[in-house]
């Protein structure tokens, strides 16, 4: 076999008739590239100055275009959060949400368990000096990487750490319920106002895409005039020693913990505030779980238009998280409606003389990511949060009225609040 000659011209392995076809294809492809080049250049010019990477369309008009993700801010430009309290919600939901936010980043951890905080700091790339405990928390005032403090502590600690965070010059995002009393809620609002810091309550459901879609249906009168809201939010609690079953820490049982979702959804979806409440409570002190807090609660809210909300919440039954909105033209439901993920929207209307049930396909998004990024945009743009302290205060007023009604065995009248909600959340990005 003759030695190979590296300098010899390479011979095509295509037969001659295929070589001509190949030349035709390359000529055709070159023509396509020449045609695309000016389109791509024009597109690049139109997006100059934007961080978003996009592409010219490559499908026929009959096909849905593929949406490119909106760009996030560079990490150094994102709003930094110190998360206070490293329980299940923080570890399982909030820290992963912060990792996928576009305008927010994790900057510090605050915990009474340093070993746990060190594990999480390593996992999320935080330095040792970014870990605080409850005693030295006030030193966060000198940390410029922290702009917002997210409070995820037992309810009885919300007021203390909101006030301390505001005094440290930080904005506050606080988990619901806002506090254990109306007086504490008012102190939190006042502290943030005096410090000229923003206060937002973490009502994640008001940012969830399906709930936003249901709100639009209600506002557009797709269901007609709203008549009734029916909802339950219950779960079967276990260990009697957990803090949610201690009244001093939780402020109550299922009502402030999960029943608050029903209260807030009725107000949020109707756009009204209740004028009276009637409540009933089941106490079962023979069960070691319920020696300090109620086992279940049932309540009715009545609104100025005649709209009513009939709700129940308990710690004594299998998880149930549904809501149903009924109007003169149709109904809509979320079942589940208050879950972290997997919520499902259905609605029924009369169409051409037949009852038709729809289940729209709406892309899910992480509720915690949406609420955190909303707070960050409010800080960046100096906007009032959609769910400010006044929103949490109003729910606490209603909670206290339900307890008072159950104890007195009568209807409790409510005064109309001022504005409780800020501007609608923008489509961030």
Image: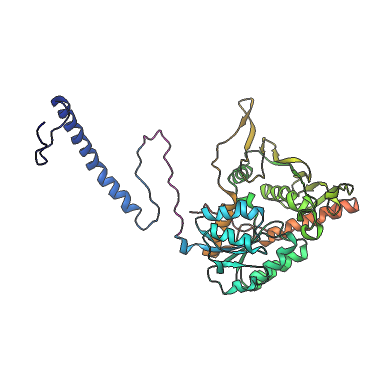
Q: Nearer the viewer, residue 127 or 51?
A: 127
Q: Nearer the viewer, residue 156 or 208?
A: 156
User: Which residue is at 78% across, 55% downward?
Assistant: 398
Residue 279 visible to an observer of this rendering: yes
Residue 198 visible to an observer of this rendering: no
User: Which residue is at 56% across, 53% downward?
Assistant: 97
Q: Is residue 346 magenta?
A: no
Q: How is the image coloured?
A: rainbow
Occupied quadrant, residue 110: bottom right
Q: Is residue 241 above or below residue 15?
A: below
State whether the magenta stretch is mostly helix, strand or loop: loop
User: Which residue is at 40% across, 56% downward?
Assistant: 51
Q: Residue placed farthest to the front in the image?
A: 1
Residue 85 position in % (x across, y down): 66, 60
Residue 376 position in % (x across, y down): 55, 60
Q: Nearer the viewer, residue 155 or 137?
A: 137
Circle count:
0
Residue 332 position in % (x across, y down): 66, 37
Occupied quadrant, residue 331: top right
User: Magenta region: which residues?
Assistant: 59-73
- The quadrant of the image that shows the N terminus is top left
Q: Is residue 80 above or below residue 2?
A: below
Residue 287 as seen in the image, left or right of residue 126: right
User: Which residue is at 64% across, 32% downward?
Assistant: 349
Residue 199 position in % (x across, y down): 64, 64
């Amino acid at each position: 076999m003759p030695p190979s000659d590296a300098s010899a011209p390479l011979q095509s392995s295509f037969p001659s008739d295929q070589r001509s076809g190949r030349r035709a294809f390359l000529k055709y492809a070159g023509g396509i590239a020449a045609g695309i080049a000016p389109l791509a250049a024009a597109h690049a010019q139109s997006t100059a100055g934007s961080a978003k990477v996009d592409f010219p369309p490559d499908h026929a008009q009959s096909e849905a275009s593929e949406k490119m993700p909106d760009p996030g801010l560079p990490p150094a430009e994102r709003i930094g959060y110190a998360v206070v309290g490293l329980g299940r919600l923080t570890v399982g939901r909030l820290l992963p949400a912060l990792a996928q936010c576009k305008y927010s980043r994790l900057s510090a951890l605050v915990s009474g368990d340093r070993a746990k905080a060190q594990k999480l700091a390593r996992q999320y790339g935080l330095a040792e000096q970014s870990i605080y405990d409850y005693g030295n928390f006030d030193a966060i005032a000198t940390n410029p990487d922290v702009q917002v403090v997210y409070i995820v502590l037992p309810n009885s600690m919300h007021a203390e750490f909101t006030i301390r965070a505001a005094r440290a010059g930080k904005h506050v995002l606080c988990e619901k319920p806002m506090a254990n009393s109306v007086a504490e809620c008012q102190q939190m609002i006042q502290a943030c106002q005096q410090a000229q810091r923003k206060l937002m309550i973490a009502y994640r459901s008001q940012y969830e895409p399906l709930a936003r879609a249901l709100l639009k249906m209600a506002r557009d009168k797709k269901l007609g005039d709203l008549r009734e809201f029916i909802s339950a939010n219950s779960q079967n609690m276990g260990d009697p020693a957990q803090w949610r079953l201690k009244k001093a820490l939780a402020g109550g049982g299922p009502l402030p913990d999960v029943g608050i979702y029903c209260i807030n959804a009725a107000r949020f979806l109707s756009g009204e505030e209740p004028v009276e409440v009637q409540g009933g409570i089941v106490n079962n002190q023979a069960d070691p779980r319920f020696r300090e807090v109620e086992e279940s609660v049932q309540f009715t809210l009545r609104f100025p238009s005649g709209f009513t909300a009939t709700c129940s919440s308990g710690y004594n039954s299998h998880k149930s998280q549904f809501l149903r909105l009924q109007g003169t033209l149709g109904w809509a439901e979320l079942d589940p409606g208050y879950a972290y993920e997997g919520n499902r929207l259905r609605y029924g209307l009369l169409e051409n003389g037949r009852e038709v049930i729809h289940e729209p396909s709406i892309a899910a998004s992480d509720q915690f990511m949406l609420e955190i990024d909303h707070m960050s945009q409010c800080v960046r743009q100096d906007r009032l949060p959609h769910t400010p302290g006044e929103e949490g205060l109003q729910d606490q007023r209603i909670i206290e009225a339900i307890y008072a009604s159950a104890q007195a065995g009568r209807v409790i009248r409510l005064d109309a609040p001022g504005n409780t909600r800020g501007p609608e959340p923008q489509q961030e990005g």
